Image: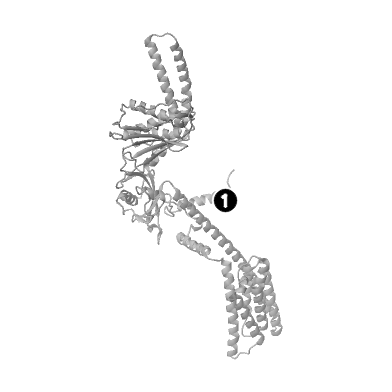
Amino acid sequence: MEAAPQDRRSGERRRGDRRATPPHAESSWFGHESTFDPSWGVSGNIELDQRLRALWSQRVVGGDDSALARIHRTYAAVRAAFGLALVAAQGAGSLLGARASLPLALICIAYAVQAIALWLLPRFQPLTTPVATPMLRRRQWLATVGVDLVAFGALHLVGSGGPINYSALLVLPVLMAGVMGPRLVALATAAGVALLLLAAASHGAWLEAELAGSLLQSGLAGLGLFVIALLSGELSARLSREEMAARGSLELARQQAQLNRLVIEEMVDGVLVVDGRLRVRAANPAARALLVDAGLSPPAPFGLESRAAWVPLARAVTRALAERDWPEAGRELTLAFEGSAPRTLRLRVRFVRGLVSGDERNGEPLCVLLLEDVRIAQARLQQEKLAAMGRVSAGIAHEIRNPLAAILQANALLLEDELPPAQRRLARIVADNVDRLKRIVDDVMELAPGGQAGAPVPLDANAEVGQAVADWAATVALPLGPSSRLRVELPDAPLGVVFDPEHLRRVLVNLLDNAGRHASQAPAAIRLQLFALSEAEAQLVVASDGPAIAPEVEPYIFEPFFSTRSRGAGLGLYICRELCVRYGASIGYRRREADVGARNEFVVTMKRCALPAADPSLQLNP
């Protein structure tokens, strides 16, 4: 469907306005400098208009009452002032020798008393504030506009031909009738005042024989009153709409600011706002945690040059502000903390401007720094790779199992026949390698999301752990005995737990491999304990005297592909955790005090169960 020519011209004009916008018209806190230009401010001092509109909105919304309420109070004060002025005018006329009119004086005094009482007495406050009840609105109109019409009309009729012209006072009730009431009531009020002026003109014209001129003058005045009533009604309605829009807009802006603050506070990445003096103006909790080795840094504001560990970050900010250029992908820098491991951060920079005075190009430059721990980012990337690998490996493993089963069956049939020793040896090699491939497939499937757990059976953890420790010690050529690196403490009686025997063996071997890799050569450098924790739980503890795991590394040791060794795959502890979860068990790490030999402890908590009566128990013979 083809667009209308007028729409195309409007679109081209908007695009032309955007092309004509200077590149520094507006700045954004969360991106490079923006070129946004409000359509209502294409010409003139845009910044001044924005500032004035912002101040007006704050004044409107920040007030305790509405603009119409202020108009009503002003109207009550003006009526009181008019009443005092009328009484003063009557008194001044008498002092100057003018002939006093008793009806005029009584009307002025009565109006002044009513206006002052309505303005000052609290009991009449509902009559001087905007109300929504129709009955109260009618009473309010009668007590203010109605009284003004009667009083000023009487003054105009009684005082016509005198030294004071009271007709100008009739403008006030007509004006307020347009503000306070609907349009029909305002027009009716203007019509009534116009008829009053015509009646007064007719009465005066019969006396002065100037009927035509007086009627024409009164008619023009009545026409002006109609215009005043219409304009005042439209202006009051527009004022109400703009006030409601301003309140709604500012409330939306306040909600958006709270939402932005909440999002920034909950962001995983750190956010810092730094000015040209290297002073941090704002910092979210993630950034404050990245700037120190433990806990949180002081809340903003603080200087980047106040600590030696922040010097690389301060230099990077100085360079960014000087060059006003930074790679989109960011750069890496390292913060070295005293007595703790260094931390590598990826730093991304966005440039903004602060408050502007005079020329908008003179604003103070600011930097929004986005900080990300490189180690955490790499672990997150590796976890995503693991998920993708799991989805692929599940399909591949299924395809591999079928030919492996065929090979195993064919090899078993081959072994049933009489074969020469050489061929039988080759057949055995085939069978062993098929079993090895099946175990590899099982390991890959264990990493796949949604892998099925083995059937949990009641087993004697005392016998299984003892046998697994003996096999592991023989594999790594570690002698057992009082002076051995490995000290084993097992219960005297069988201990039933819920676990798969092969999986429990795999968890134990992984923990012993880690302990043996980091422990010293001293006797009892590696300690293994198995005991009943309660009626429902049993614990397996593997401890070593190696260096304690750094606090910043500890939260990620059970994550996949996370390893402190350059050649480590980072899957051992992850597999241990996954296997424990499958059987309702848990695994965790805890750091002991420095004076304790075995500082690093990995604790596996398992569910206890009853063992069958005929289940034999194997004991470890050291």
**Relative depth, front residue between 437 and 72:** 437
**Residue 51 at x, y percent in the picture:** 46, 61
What residue is rendered at 49% in x and 50% in y? 15
Quadrant of the drawing holding the C terminus: top left
Q: Secondary structure at mark 1?
A: helix
Please identify the quadrant where the N terminus is shown: top right
The furthest residue to the bottom? 97
Q: As shown in the figure, which amino acid type bears the numbered disc 1?
A: Gln
- Front-most of residues 258 and 470: 470
Question: How is colour applied across the structure in the image?
Answer: one colour
Q: Vertical placement of 364 versus 506: above or below?
A: below
Is residue 161 visible in the rendered image? The answer is no
- Find residue 207 and report its image quarter: bottom right
* Residue on which the image places disc 1: 6
Image position of 166 with respect to 568: above or below: below
**Above/below status of 118 relative to 413:** below
Query: Count of labels shown?
Result: 1
Q: Residues within 10 Å of mark 1 (few under 14, many from 20)?
A: few
Q: Nearer the viewer, residue 284 or 408?
A: 408
